[in-house]
Image (spheres, rainbow, N blue to C red):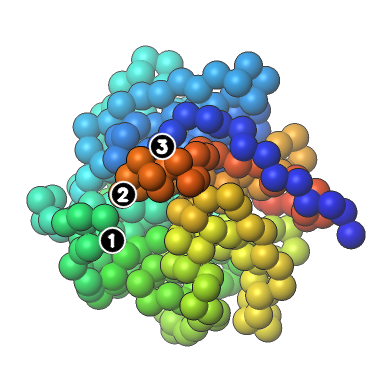
Amino acid sequence: MSSVKLECVVRERNQIGESPVWEEKEGTLLFVDIFGPRVSRWNPVTNETRSLATEMFVGAVVPRRCGGYVIAEGTRFSAVDWEKQTIAPLAHIDQNKDKIRLNDGKVDPAGRFFAGTMSIEIKPGVQDMKEGALFMLQPDHTVVKHFDQVHLSNGLDWSLDHRTFYYIDSFSYKVQAFDYDIVSGSVRNGRVLYALEKDEGIPDGMCIDTEGKLWVACFDGGRVIRIDPQTGTRIQTVKLPVDKVTSCCFGGKDYSDLYVTTASYGMDDQAIARQPEAGYIFKVTGLGVKGIPPNSFAG
């Protein structure tokens, strides 16, 4: 068994660091700070982070096949031209922009951008329930709503054979699985895959490895857990020195490093003094597994 090593690599405090994406061509890590609100790109060679401010709370960023990125911000999907440092709206979702915002998102293997919503927090940890929904931005920039009655739409990914869609509604405290049709992008037959135990916190972002196992970031749980979708059991736990663990992705030259984003939102000075690395980004090595490259939006 290889020895797992944890290293804090991006020491710039995010309020809610989220949506990490490894860019193989550039050798950089892309991520957002939801309440920054900003999109950032960190270069591990130079240790420099470059950021672009967004107009609204930004829940997710994904690569785009034609270049640049697409972000889920506020109640719209927008195109980011990183070289010009500009943002242009692509499509809007049909929800109240004063009460709702897009949260976590990811591109499916066919190039569609899935992202869900949640009600905007009144204060840390306080929000309306069942106000969220799961949306899909298609390559022609039309938006499809898959389902609603979601508390807080969060982590998502697809099985290696593309037949299963994995999904987290954070305040259900569960990881769900759905049948997935890669041709149409349809999602159906939801079922519970894994229910979090009390000390594991709130399920947040997630990613999949080359063995088809899921890595789930546990907010207020201070850990990332590895789940076997076949058995619905937890098979590994990686603890972090901060409680508010938000998301994870594999990266590095062979996708064997796990990058983990965290948050500092809602923490006072005393809490930050106890967890001085809150809001920073960590790298986990020596896990003995690899991830898969991210998909890019086709539109």
Q: At 53% from the left edge and 70% from the top edge, which residue is drawn?
A: 200
Q: Which residue is mark 3?
A: 14
Label placed on residue 266: 2
Residue 81 shows up from this direction: no
Q: Which residue is mark 1?
A: 125
* Residue 85 in the image, given as x and y percentages of width and height: 35, 18
Is there a contact, CB below 8 Å, between mark 2 and mark 1? yes
Name the secondary structure under disc 1.
Answer: loop
Q: At 60% from the left edge and 52% from the top edge, which residue is drawn?
A: 240
The answer to whether 279 appears left or right of 95 in the picture is: right
Residue 12 shows up from this direction: yes
Q: Amino acid at mark 2?
A: Gly
Q: Nearer the viewer, mark 3 or mark 2?
A: 2
Disc nearer the start of the sequence (1/3):
3
Q: At 32% from the left edge and 65% from the top edge, which residue is drawn?
A: 152
Disc nearer the start of the sequence (3/2):
3
The answer to whether 257 appears left or right of 215 in the picture is: right
Quadrant of the image occupied by residue 23: top right
